[in-house]
Image (cartoon, helix red, strand yellow):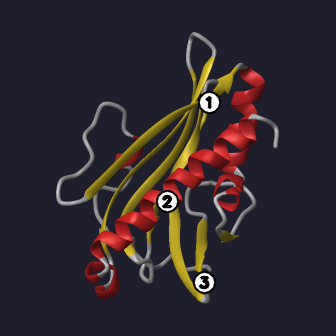
């Protein structure tokens, strides 16, 4: 870890956390939102799980981070295992939300990540007390092999996003 002098592998830093702003062109976009429950207790449980890397761990990733909680500048490497092969994904947190009804973070890719882009994990509790968990991302291949892997790479990203959302639901249930 400790690669703070290294620049992110993309521009448009923070775009995934900007409300009402389209994600940058030239990238594959993901935006998935699920209802995870109701009430302040559910919101806080899922928010703490997002900010404390539990959603990533719950999605089956090995997580190494410079801090126990997301904060701007924290570097985190998530590793996905596919059989005997491991894919490391180094990132840096570029934005954090920790408000009464909205919490989460966005991180951007560093050199060595298979993709180039940004991903945000946001939990919101609406005025109706319904708690939503949203994943918002933009990416494009960051390595020659992820470029060549095209449809396979997208399928893996879709699967991991689905697993993040399922981990958020489990946190909401107190599991």
List x then y, in percent, for residue 123. 58, 35
Name the quadrant containing residue 39: top right
In this rendered view, identify the residue nearer to me: 132 or 100: 132
Dot 2 or dot 1, earlier in sequence: 1
Q: Is residue 26 above or below residue 125?
A: below
Residue 6's tag is none
Label 3 sits on residue: 83
Label 2 sits on residue: 159
Residue furthest left as drawn: 26
Q: Is residue 56 above or below residue 63?
A: above
Residue depicted at x 37% and y 72%: 153
**Disc 1 versus disc 3: distance between alpha carbons?**
39 Å
Q: Secondary structure at mark 2?
A: helix
List x then y, in percent, for residue 77. 59, 73
Quadrant where the N terminus is found in the figure: bottom right
**Disc 2 versus disc 1: distance between alpha carbons?**
29 Å
């Amino acid at each position: 870890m400790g690669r703070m002098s290294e620049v992110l592998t993309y521009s448009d830093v923070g775009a995934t956390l900007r409300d009402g702003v389209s994600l940058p062109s030239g990238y594959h976009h993901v935006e998935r939102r699920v209802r995870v429950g109701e009430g302040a207790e559910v919101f806080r449980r899922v928010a703490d799980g997002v900010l404390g890397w539990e959603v990533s761990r719950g999605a089956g990733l090995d997580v190494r981070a410079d801090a126990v909680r997301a904060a701007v500048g924290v570097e985190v490497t998530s590793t996905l295992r596919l059989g005997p092969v491991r894919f490391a994904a180094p990132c840096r947190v570029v934005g954090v939300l920790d408000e009464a009804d909205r919490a989460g973070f966005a991180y951007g890719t560093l050199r060595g990540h298979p993709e180039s882009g940004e991903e945000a994990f946001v939990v919101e509790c609406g005025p109706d007390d319904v708690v939503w968990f949203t994943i918002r991302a933009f990416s494009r291949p960051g390595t020659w092999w992820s470029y060549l892997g095209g449809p396979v790479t997208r399928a893996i990203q879709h699967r991991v996003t689905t697993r993040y959302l399922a981990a958020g639901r489990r946190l909401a249930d107190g599991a």
